[in-house]
């Protein structure tokens, strides 16, 4: 029966270790999920200035490299640190039972290592931040290169992009290797301390406590070797953990960004007709005024062509309808100031089709009906109107990189997404800039046939389509310099639009 005792103790120890490991895994997984969810929500709801001030590579770096540390490396390092320090405490207690003097030696030894670690961390943390910050331009460059790969090949500028990539890669590798060398140097110093500590224990028994029995000497030296091994791993893991916590700090930095104010007073069945009125509206990027004291009214169902030179403020004027930026003055839609409306209500009721089509990875149904509120018949009706019914055999067809869709077909899917919503206000921002002439004709025909009861803003550089619009808004240097129908604008031969129109006709 006596031999069952160690067996039971071993089984109990195994179960406790297993239970502790499972608890630790669940705890760290939950912490990682909470950090990821919090950062994602804060970025999604961040004000537009957040995205203006940061490159895409910086944001991708937070969700890739930094979260990799949070998910995998930090939990492992923290576990080893805790395990090693518990082992050090146990060994120190055992050595103290032999001779109390060893406790003093152990405390001095640990204090020396701790001070050295503090000095190392000041340098290592700065190097780690440098490594992570130099990785962001590299990630952003790779992402931008893949997005513009067709343009790069067509322009035959691959060598230029390769040199830029090498420059970003060299900078990142330089910062990374300096950090690794610094860590290796710290490891070398800790090995020197371990050797000195072990040598002092042996020196103590050789010259001070010569009467100690062999068993005691063997026990202390063996435990001293375990002690130095545990502290070597423990302090190095602690230093590594502190460096890796820089990733957590960078993640938390993105959880403190300024958020959009989405509060407001809900208005039932808004908007009813879609009449828009600008009153003394001004808007500035920083200190530079982009829009200046705009005053105009767009009646229900009017099609407005917004034209002007690049940088004149066309897109900025339209974006003010979505409250992406803080503005001065008022924008009234059906006599309601949009600044007093809930953000979700405002944006859900304004259709925006951008120049570059955006499709989600998923099925056709999920791309057309984002909130899954419409029936299959309604979705097929929208797809049929944009002429894509023959392209898909099912609403569950996956839209991914394997499905080769032209830019025009992608834009038509985005247009179907807008058709099914039946909003009272629609914004089309150069939606035919990247499509062929046949698709271009189809898109404008779809707009004429299906958005007749909708207030439409159409940003375009193509004069041939402004003839179909009720009014033309000419924007120049942030001002609406002309706003009338085609016939009236052509009568003013000194006007901005007349010069633009005649120049286009002469081409």
Image (cartoon, rainbow, N blue to C red):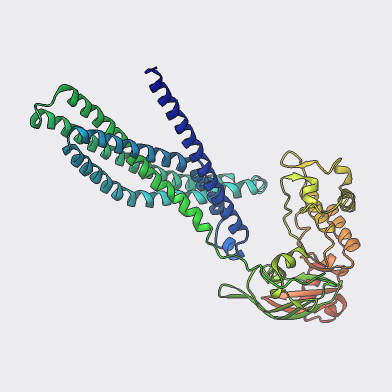
Picture coordinates of residue 204, whole percent (x, y): 13, 32
Q: How many marks?
A: 0
Q: Specify whether 19 is left or right of 402.
A: left
Q: Specify whether 3 is left or right of 452.
A: left
Check the picture and name the quadrant holding the N terminus: top left
Q: Specify whether 285 is left or right of 108.
A: right
Q: Residue at x 51, y 51 (%)?
A: 136
Picture coordinates of residue 342, whole percent (x, y): 70, 69
Picture coordinates of residue 343, whole percent (x, y): 69, 67
Compared with residue 479, is residue 12 higher up or lower down, i.e. above or below?
above
Q: Residue at x 88, y 58 (%)?
A: 446
Residue 140 seen in this snapshot: no
Q: Quadrant of residue 85?
A: top left
Compared with residue 15, is residue 263 higher up or lower down, i.e. above or below?
below
Residue 113 seen in this snapshot: yes
Q: Residue at x 50, y 48 (%)?
A: 66
Looking at this view, name the residue that lies furthest to the front: 1
Between 494 and 347, the residue placed more toward the observer is 347
Between 91 and 435, the residue placed more toward the observer is 91
Compared with residue 387, is residue 445 higher up or lower down, i.e. above or below?
below
Check the picture and name the quadrant holding the C terminus: bottom right
Between 334 and 143, the residue placed more toward the observer is 334
Q: Quadrant of residue 109?
A: top left
Picture coordinates of residue 379, whole percent (x, y): 86, 51
């Amino acid at each position: 029966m006596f031999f069952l005792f160690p067996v039971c103790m071993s089984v109990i120890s195994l179960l406790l270790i297993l239970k502790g490991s499972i608890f630790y895994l669940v705890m760290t997984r939950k912490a990682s999920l909470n950090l990821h969810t919090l950062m994602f929500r804060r970025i999604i709801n961040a004000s537009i200035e957040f995205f203006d001030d940061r490159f895409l590579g910086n944001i991708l770096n937070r969700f890739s490299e930094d979260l990799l540390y949070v998910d995998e490396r930090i939990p492992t390092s923290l576990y080893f640190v805790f395990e090693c320090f518990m082992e050090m405490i146990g060994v120190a207690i055992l050595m103290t039972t032999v001779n109390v003097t060893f406790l003093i030696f152990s405390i001095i030894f640990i204090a020396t290592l701790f001070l050295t670690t503090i000095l190392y961390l000041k340098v290592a943390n700065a190097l780690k931040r440098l490594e992570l910050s130099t990785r962001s331009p590299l990630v952003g460059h790779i992402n931008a290169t893949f997005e513009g790969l067709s343009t790069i090949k067509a322009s035959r500028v691959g060598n230029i992009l390769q040199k830029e990539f090498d420059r970003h890669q060299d900078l990142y590798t330089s910062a990374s290797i300096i950090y690794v060398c610094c860590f290796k140097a710290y490891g070398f110093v800790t090995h020197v301390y371990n050797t000195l500590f072990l040598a002092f224990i042996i020196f103590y028994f050789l010259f001070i406590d010569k009467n100690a029995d062999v068993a005691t000497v063997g026990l202390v030296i063996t435990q001293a070797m375990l002690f130095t091994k545990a502290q070597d791993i423990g302090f190095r893991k602690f230093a590594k953990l502190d460096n890796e916590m820089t990733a957590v700090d960078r993640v938390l930095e993105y959880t403190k960004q300024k958020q959009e104010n989405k509060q407001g007073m809900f208005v039932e069945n808004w908007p009813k007709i879609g009449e828009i009125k600008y009153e003394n509206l001004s808007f500035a990027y920083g200190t530079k005024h982009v829009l200046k004291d705009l005053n105009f009214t767009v009646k229900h169902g009017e099609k407005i062509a917004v034209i002007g030179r690049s940088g004149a403020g066309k897109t900025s004027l339209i974006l003010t309808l979505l409250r992406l930026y803080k503005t001065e003055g008022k924008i009234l839609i059906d006599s309601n100031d949009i600044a007093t409306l809930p953000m979700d209500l405002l944006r859900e009721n304004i259709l925006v089709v951008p120049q570059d089509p955006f499709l989600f990875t998923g099925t056709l149904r999920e791309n057309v009906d984002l909130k899954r509120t419409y029936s299959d018949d309604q979705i097929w009706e929208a797809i049929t109107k944009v002429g894509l019914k023959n392209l898909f055999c099912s609403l569950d067809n996956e839209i991914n990189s394997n499905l080769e869709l032209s830019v025009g077909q992608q834009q038509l899917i985005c247009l179907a997404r807008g058709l099914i919503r039946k909003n009272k206000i629609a914004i089309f921002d150069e939606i035919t800039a990247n499509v062929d002439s046949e698709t271009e004709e189809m898109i404008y025909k779809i707009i004429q046939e299906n958005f007749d009861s909708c207030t439409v803003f159409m940003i375009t550089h193509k004069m041939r389509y402004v003839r179909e619009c009720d009014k033309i808004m000419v924007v120049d240097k942030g001002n609406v310099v002309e706003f009338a129908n085609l016939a009236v604008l052509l009568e003013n031969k000194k006007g901005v639009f007349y010069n633009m129109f005649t120049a286009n006709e002469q081409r």
